[in-house]
Image (spheres, rainbow, N blue to C red):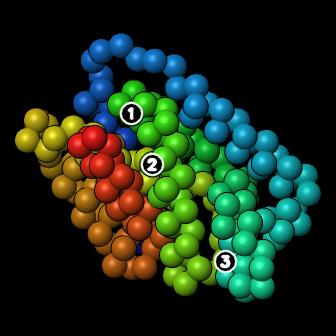
């Protein structure tokens, strides 16, 4: 397993744990948007497993994008270069993180944060990771937004430690030119803009 994969997984795990602790009280609404996106991703994964050439048609591939296949910047988010194991992991992580985001952000913000971070990750991926696919960068963007959903000063000591660790992991990913870190930073910044409007 690549070190960047471990760092991204650790980042998502710490954010999920911190947000879960913070949201343990209060009413919960059904994460309909997250369920819908996960359902769509599952359908795409099943189609890819049934017809494997779909991945090469829709993945992020800088060479093909430069030739004019610009749609790959978006379609790469719906197919999984990790195939069944990576795809199921990505969908499960989105289910966990996205469901928490629907508790703290309006669904329109969820879309802006998820899509914004994913597109920035995809664009940086053209140089940093020229070939790839998966929804993990959208999940990292949503996770980044959870870090700033509550003011730092209002967090418990444990939450402050977890937030600091997650921020450090995010910066390590960026330092390694990993698109997951860039997406997470985008989520942090977009989340901050949502708080001040």
Residue drawn 86% across the image and 49% down it: 47
Q: Determine which of the numbered discs, if any, sits on residue 113 in the image.
A: 2
Residue drawn 64% across the image and 39% down it: 37
**Label 3 environment density (alpha carbons within 10 Å; few <14, some 14–19, many ≥20):** some
Are the residues tagged 2 and 1 within 8 Å (C-beta)? yes
**Label 1 environment density (alpha carbons within 10 Å; few <14, some 14–19, many ≥20):** some
Q: In this rendering, would 15 be left or right of 75?
A: left
In this picture, is 129 found above or below 42? below
Are the residues tagged 2 and 3 within 8 Å (C-beta)? no
Tell me the mark number nearer the camera, choosing from 3 and 1: 1
Query: Between marks 2 and 1, how big is the CA–CA gap?
Result: 10 Å
- Furthest-right residue in view? 51
Q: In this rendering, would 13 be left or right of 52?
A: left
Quarter that holds the C terminus: top left
Tell me the mark number nearer the camera, choosing from 2 and 3: 2
On the image, the x and y values in percent for residue 154 come to: 10, 35
Query: Between marks 2 and 3, how big is the CA–CA gap?
Result: 23 Å
Q: Between disc 3 and disc 1, whose residue precedes?
A: 1
In the picture of the structure, the residue carrying the numbered disc 1 is: 105
Query: Between marks 3 and 1, how big is the CA–CA gap?
Result: 32 Å
In this picture, is 165 found above or below 59? above
Q: Between disc 2 and disc 1, whose residue precedes?
A: 1
On the image, the x and y values in percent for residue 45 come to: 77, 49
Q: In this rendering, would 86 be left or right of 181?
A: right
Q: Determine which of the numbered discs, if any, sits on residue 131 in the image.
A: 3
The secondary structure type at the circle numbered 3 is strand
On the image, the x and y values in percent for residue 70 come to: 72, 72
């Amino acid at each position: 397993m690549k070190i960047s994969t471990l760092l991204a997984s650790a980042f998502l795990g710490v954010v999920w744990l911190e947000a879960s602790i913070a949201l343990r009280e209060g009413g919960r609404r059904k994460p309909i948007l997250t369920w819908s996106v996960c359902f769509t991703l599952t359908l795409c994964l099943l189609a890819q497993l049934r017809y494997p050439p779909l991945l090469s048609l829709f993945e992020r591939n800088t060479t093909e994008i430069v030739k004019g296949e610009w749609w790959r910047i978006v379609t790469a988010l719906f197919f999984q270069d990790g195939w069944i194991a990576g795809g199921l992991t990505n969908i499960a992580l989105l289910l966990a993180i996205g469901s928490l985001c629907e508790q703290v952000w309006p669904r329109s913000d969820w879309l802006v944060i998820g899509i914004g971070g994913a597109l920035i990750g995809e664009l940086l991926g053209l140089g940093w990771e020229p070939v790839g696919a998966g929804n993990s960068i959208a999940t990292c963007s949503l996770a980044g937004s959870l870090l700033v959903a509550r003011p730092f000063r209002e967090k418990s000591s444990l939450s402050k430690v977890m937030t600091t660790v997650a921020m450090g992991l995010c910066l390590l990913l960026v330092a390694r030119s990993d698109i997951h870190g860039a997406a997470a930073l985008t989520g942090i910044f977009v989340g901050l803009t949502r708080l001040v409007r």
